Image: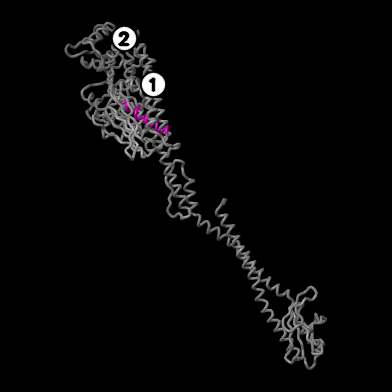
Amino acid sequence: MIHSIRQFLLTSLLISITIASSITAIGNYLLDKQIIQPYLDGQLVNFFSFIETFTHEKAKDIHPSTSELAELSSTTTKSLFFQVWDNKGHLVLHSKTHWNDILNNAPVGFSDLQLGKDNWRLYTQYDRSKEYKIIVAELYDIRRELADDIARNNAYILLISYPIFGVLIWLIVSLALRSVIRVTGEISNRASTYLEPVDASDIPIEIKPVVTELNKLFIRLKLAFDRNKRFAGDAAHELRTPLAALRTQAQVALKSDNKTERENALLKMIVGVDRSSHIVTQLLTLSRLSQEETLNDERPLDLHKVATEIIAYLVPQALEKDIEIELAPPPKNAVIYGNETALGILISNIVDNAIRYTPRNGSVKMSILNDGKHIIFRTIDSGPGIPEELCERVFERFFRVLGTTETGSGLGLAIVQQIAELHSAKIVLSTPPGGGLQFDVLFPI
Amino acid sequence: MRILLVEDDELLGDGLTTGLTQSGYAIDWLKDGASADQALKSETFDLIVLDLGLPKLSGITVLQNLRSRGTTTPVLILTARESVEDRVKGLDNGADDYLTKPFDLDELCARLRALQRRFSSRAEPTLTHKNIILDPASHTVSLNGEMINVSRREFALLHKLLENSGRVISREHLMQTLYGWGDDVDSNALEVHIHNLRKKFGQDFIQTIRGIGYIVEPNNENTENK
């Protein structure tokens, strides 16, 4: 888990740089050694030439003066020595140090030699007259020291550049993360009710999907939020009148000194309470449905079976008004995919509405049809019907057709529509021959 | 007092009709804007209680039509709309008072009395005529400091006459004050009430102007300095 992209990039890039420069340094170190070797060997050969010249100059008087020797010795150091041998195997010239090591059998050319703890690079060659064998030697350590010095300098440079790298990476990452920080700031400064989309322009493509998804979520939230706000407002508004009626009837009952008048007011209060609870129940149903975008617990259902059960509950209500109520025999296939409870509410609301608005001695007839593409739940009543211009509006929440005396909540059809939408079903209202209302719900097969 | 109540809710309309009748008002209850508009064109009311969300014609339109005809009858808006914009809109369109649902019946009655008082340019809550004091709030009448028992209709009739003392009020106007449209009215009901009031407050207290109506003599110390 990366807690901070900046931290992560900083450390991982610095580690990468360290690894890369270490490899470079080791490589350079090895390469340096290869370059240094022939270079220093060349110097060794130069030293040989110098000793050779010196030997020739001193050939006449092979025993050099002490002052000359001293001069020569001064050119040598602890890390450099030489020996000159004649053909007879006498050491004729030598440096101040290492003159007692017998080296006249050293092979001609470059060779390595260990003397005590020290490793030496040797160059052995005869002079031009082939009279003398000259051996020059240099301590290996000097070579390693040189390579080490170079490597150390490289390391120093790297160390100095580290903070610079760090600062640069920090700045670059900050620059790259600027839009992320902008979006973060924009979101964190929001009030909980501000749900407008985040400005997605000049956002890098890497985080654009996040912002896009976030914006989609904002839109969904805004819709839900608006829906709830409107809903609460509507609900409060719609309950005001029934509550006012209850209060007025209660006060009438309290003030009345007439028994009939008082009883009448109390009975009306009961009607009012029933109406209010009906509204509350419907509101809760609608609120529960509105919060869902898809139905859960969906399964294949025989619509005819569901309808039979629900309508059975509504039959007494119809008989009370002497309304003829019937459900036609089912088609061969009446199976739809849906939620049983929701479909029950849908059927119940449609049929209840039909019974409510159908006058006494009227009829309410239900049937389930299969037209090959849809399973249709059809209700035909002999009520007053709905004027065509109001067919859209009856599904609005709290809309009630003017002039009706039935005390509905104005929510029943809004609920029906909500449930139909959740089942991808279509509602078609029409006037059947002979008047009334034909209410079709078309469920796709 | 004759009140036109315009309210589309059955239960509330019923409650208000009964409640206001208990307080001695004659109520005419209409359930939609169009019939209220029609009624206001032809009839006179003392007060109007108007809902805003009405079928057929909105309460605001009814109010605008009423005011455009020059009618000054006090209007109290009774509505579920409680926002400041709605209140301002209602009052600016000619309403005299605004009450939101749910409300208290006593408060409604008090506001109606206040509207009536202001409409008849009175400052005191009680009506005083010589030795008679009528208190619309407590629904009581006293003569020389003694409480007099009066029926609901007698009270309404007395109230109307005292409020218009010095002016002749037609028989029809008084009938409208006492009875709503639905009320079963006897042809000589008004005469019976007048008779009863004369019996309780003195024979010459209410004068009959033949063929025109009734008048209560102006109260010199009181009405002149109004």
Magenta part of the protein: which range? A340-357
Within 10 Å of disc 2 (Cα), the crowding (few <14, some 14-19, many 20+) is some
Q: Percent position (x, y) of residue A179?
A: 48, 53
Foreground residue among B112 and B218: B112
Q: Percent position (x, y) of residue A428?
A: 30, 36
Q: Is residue B2 above or below residue A233?
A: above
Which numbered circle lies on residue B150?
2
* Residue at 37% over, 17% down: A267
Q: Is residue B207 above or below residue A112?
A: above
Task: Identify the image quadrant of residue B169.
Answer: top left
Q: Residue furthest left?
A: B211
Q: Quarter of the image containing the N terminus of chain B?
A: top left
Looking at the picture, which amino acid does disc 2 mark? Val
Residue under mark 1: which chain is it in?
A
Q: Percent position (x, y) of residue B170?
A: 20, 16
- The answer to whether residue A212 is seen in the rendering is yes
Q: Is residue B204 above or below residue A125?
A: above
Residue A293 part of the magenta segment: no
Secondary structure at numbered mark 2: loop
Which numbered circle lies on residue B205?
none
Foreground residue among B143 and A10: A10
Q: Quarter of the image containing the C terminus of chain B?
A: top left
Residue A356 part of the magenta segment: yes
Decide whether the magenta segment is chiefly helix, strand or loop: helix
Task: Identify the image quadrant of residue A418.
Answer: top left
Name the residue beneath numbered marker 1.
A247
Q: Work out how far the residue at label 1 is from the one at label 2, CA to CA, in angstroms.
A: 28 Å
Secondary structure at numbered mark 1: helix
Looking at the picture, which amino acid does disc 1 mark? Arg
